[in-house]
Amino acid sequence: MGPQPTEPDDRALIFGPYRLHPSRQSLSRDGVPVRIGARAFDLLTLLVRRSGDLVSKKELLEFGWPDTFVHEGNLKVNVAALRRVLAGTESDASDASYIATVPGRGYRFVVPVAVEPVAPPAEPSPPISPAVSVHSRTLPAQRPLIGRRQEIARLADRLAGARCLSIVGPGGVGKTTVAVAVAHEARAGFADGISFVDLSTIDDPQYVPAAIAAGIGARQAADDGLAGIIDALHERRVLLLLDNCEHLAPAVAATVERLTTALPLLTVLATSREPLRIAPEYVHRLPTLEVPAPGRAMTAEQALEFPAIRLFVTRARERCDYALTDADAPLVSAICQRLDGIALAIELAASKTGAYDVATLLQMLEQRFQLLSNGPRQAPLRQQTLLATLDWSYRLLSDDEATLLRLLSVFAGVFHLQDAIAVAEAAGLAPAQAIDAIERLTARSLVAVEYRDGALHYRLLDSTRAYAGERLAAAGEQDRAMARYARHVLSLFERADEQWSWREKQEWLAEYAGRIDDLRKVMAWAFGPKGGTGAGGDGLSGIRMLGVRLTAAAIPLWDELSSVAEARARVDSALLAVREIGDCPAELKMKLAGARASGMNFAQTLVPETEAAWLDCYRLGVEADSLEYQLRGLWGLSIYLVFTGRPLEAIGRLGELMELAEAHADWSAIHEGERVLAMAETYIGRLASARLRLDRLAAYYRQPKERARIARFQLDRLVAIGCSLAFLLWLTGGPARAARVAEDAVDRAEAIGHIVSQSNALAFGAIPIALWSGDEDGAARFQAMLEDNLRRENIAVWSPLGRFFRSALRARQGAPGGVAEMKARLAELIAGRFVVRAPMYHCMLAETLLAAGEIEEARGAVRDARASVQAQSEMWCLAEVLRLDGLVHLRAGRPEEAERLMAKAIRAAQEIGALSLEVRAALALAAKLEAECRLGEAVEVLEACHARSAGEYDFADLAAARERLRESMGKRGQQTASA
């Protein structure tokens, strides 16, 4: 048994500004929670409880890893991480280290510890949804700074009047840290917020707009990458912080120039190793930290007045309890001078004080500069300075460490231990060698490590990654390393593809969503102009095929993340590669065909080729004997037919789907077929049948265990059912319940973080139901949600419909030009062949035109509505078309024809059970009869409608009908009394 706790669990342990609660598994500093991994927490608890005592390595290993054999290096990594966590702020710089090393024996906690009872814990807050947090883009926390306070204040003042401020300087000088501090200092001046965009993981200039769009939460239009950004930031006072621009400078410069021209309220803060060289740019060259003049004699106290020396001493003390002495002061001063006051270089040097005294460090550094001075002089001075720092640190590594550092440069961002082991195979390193090497690299601060969600996350600093990448290329290892990295990423996503069908969704996303930058990097390499050349013997065709396989494996992730535009672009690249290769397994062709067709269903224009694409998916499914892709092909084709106004054809295809699914007892596919069939039946007027199907499905899928996954049929099943049911409820006269069901569908989609499902629920359910019910405030709220979704993801199919709804709201509110805009947006919608429900949209336009006194134009809109009802067999809204036709005739002075059409509208609604449309028609007819003093007939019309309404008055039309009925009855009574 390992050492056991000695303090009761209900006590808090206090040391310095920290409060440790073992029973709550929490650590806080000045009341602010501190993130720390479970293993590190256990080690800290034991050390704190035995404050002042030597705790041996054996005791710590037994306590932290009970009944498990682990390498001693794991303990070193955890203790090093603990030291970094506990020395997390500048105010700690004058304090002693919390954990002291007793060489060869163990560790001692050297700070006094107080013990006090803990109050009972408050009720825990509800957990934050991973689906929400995965996609957030926030300004990083402000790091402690040494020697930059006045400079940051000046830059914040400058930022207030600048359009573009670039912080320029050599790598490692602290540009990002200063920029983030400036943004925090100036944030009060940006009422609409600050967006931080890290460009370091972007290799291709064409993805600069995509990175910015993701950073601000905007959509990226396919034809103009910046249009969605401009739309999202229009008339907003925003600070856009673009970090690490140097490798993409021309593309960033062009982007910033256009954005600042189009958006007068936008301010851009950029960090780069060179200026962007554009007109609105103000360049601030960030100086290095101040160092003493060469040869100046000084005491330790005098030396600490210089920021560079204070930084060195602070970081050295965090490593090994270092204290600057008068004897060391000139040596440390010389080190900081040789490193030109570059913060990263100084931190790297200070990190070696645990292994070397400062005199040895200075000697090694001077030798390194001698070697560098004989190197290529054409390199910019700033690169020579950083190369000197990093190259010197690199020389201290063993062969295994240096090899692994080079290989780790292939990762786009965060990686895990198993990833490092996998790429290490490219150099023949065994797993044990790789584990040992990464532990040592972490200890040397060349690999950053973070404890998060109970696991270790590693990454290379940007400058370290760039340096190691150059070393990788110089060693002739790049192709082999990239090939091994690519195969590893492929194995990850093929495993993800296999696990998707059975693993819990949030757990699955937590593991794989964060790997999307690695996915993008491998695809860019595999499909790039040099992809695979000489890569480990695979050759160009082999690496192209790897990219094709990776694309197919990544389809579920893109669908779960609602990354419609990216998926379509990547699939197109893979299909080009398939044509280039000339030979491809049928299964891959089938998956790519299905993904391509799916992307076409989400396009802004539903081109005729989409039908052929879905048929191709189905055909390949038959050839490969894949039930899944036969079903997907028939399903996608049915959706396309419904969207393009062909519900009768869709019903035929859905019959094929249901027959195939029933033959194989595929209940998920059967239920999806039922849902889409109910939707198609609603449009052709079979409301009773559709209602039975949807009620049955809603009851079944209320059980959490029965809820289907998204990626198979693109939408969350329960959200989609709720959307279809809400529309049908409104149509059949259940307006209050319809509104509730529609909002529930929107809320569920929000809870699971699926933008495609929520956009579908908004566009087909919540927004039109609110508009048709007269709830303009609700419609505006839902419309804003849809527009926000479309800014976040380029789901183009709903963009024209969203613009139409927005124009309809503006027209109803009497906005100048609102009616003309509504006409234009409806024409745009029809031109894109997204014509489902078009008859109702024409009726909305006709009613708006009538209200504006445009009778002839209203007549034309009704004529278009009649034509689309006939062409599309959308009998569900025939009654509304007849009602509007009657109103047009009434306004044109033809009351007899108007009355006939309104009566016909009532009968048409009654025939299919569309109570809402019956009420509308009855209201119109009663108003006409009342105007002609035919009150008895008006009351009869309204009484008949009221009798069928089952007493549901909270819908606007029904409430109006009741009020009209009462008024008419009162007038009739007055007539009788006066007679």
Image: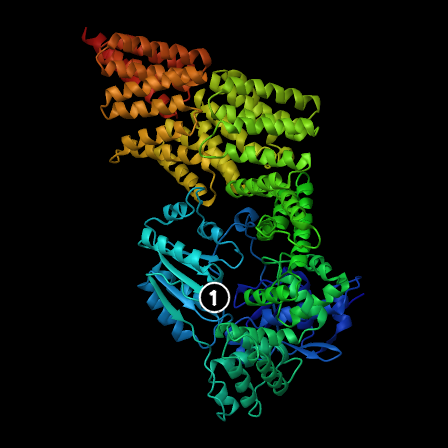
Q: Is residue 570 left or right of residue 765?
A: right
Rendering quarter of residue 278: bottom left
The residue that appears at 41% across and 32% down in the rendered structure is: 801
Rendering quarter of residue 669: top right
Q: How is the image coloured?
A: rainbow
Callout 1: helix, strand or loop? helix
Quadrant containing the C terminus in the rendered view: top left
Q: From the top left corner, tell me how far across and down residue 532 is, in percent.
A: 64, 52
Compared with 440, 728 (above or below) is above
Neighbours of disc 1 within 10 Å: few (<14), some (14-19), many (20+): many
> Is residue 113 at least partly visible in the picture?
no
The residue that appears at 50% across and 87% down in the rendered structure is: 303
Q: From the top left corner, tell me how far across and down residue 579 is, in percent.
A: 60, 38
Q: Is residue 936 left or right of residue 775?
A: left
Q: Is residue 866 left or right of residue 555?
A: left
Q: Is residue 406 left or right of residue 136?
A: right
Compared with 517, 475 (above or below) is below
Q: From the top left corner, tell me how far across and down residue 664 is, in percent.
A: 71, 24
Which one is nearer the viewer's eye here, 185 or 923? 185
Quadrant containing the N terminus in the rendered view: bottom right
> Is residue 245 at least partly visible in the picture?
yes
The furthest residue to the left: 978
Rendering quarter of residue 838: top left
Task: Name the residue beneath numbered marker 1.
Answer: 176
Q: Total number of numbered labels?
A: 1
- Residue type at mark 1 is Thr
Compared with 719, 961 (above or below) is above
Which one is nearer the viewer's eye here, 482 or 409? 482
The furthest residue to the top: 979
Compared with 69, 944 (above or below) is above
Q: From the top left corner, tell me how far across and down residue 2 is, in percent.
A: 78, 67
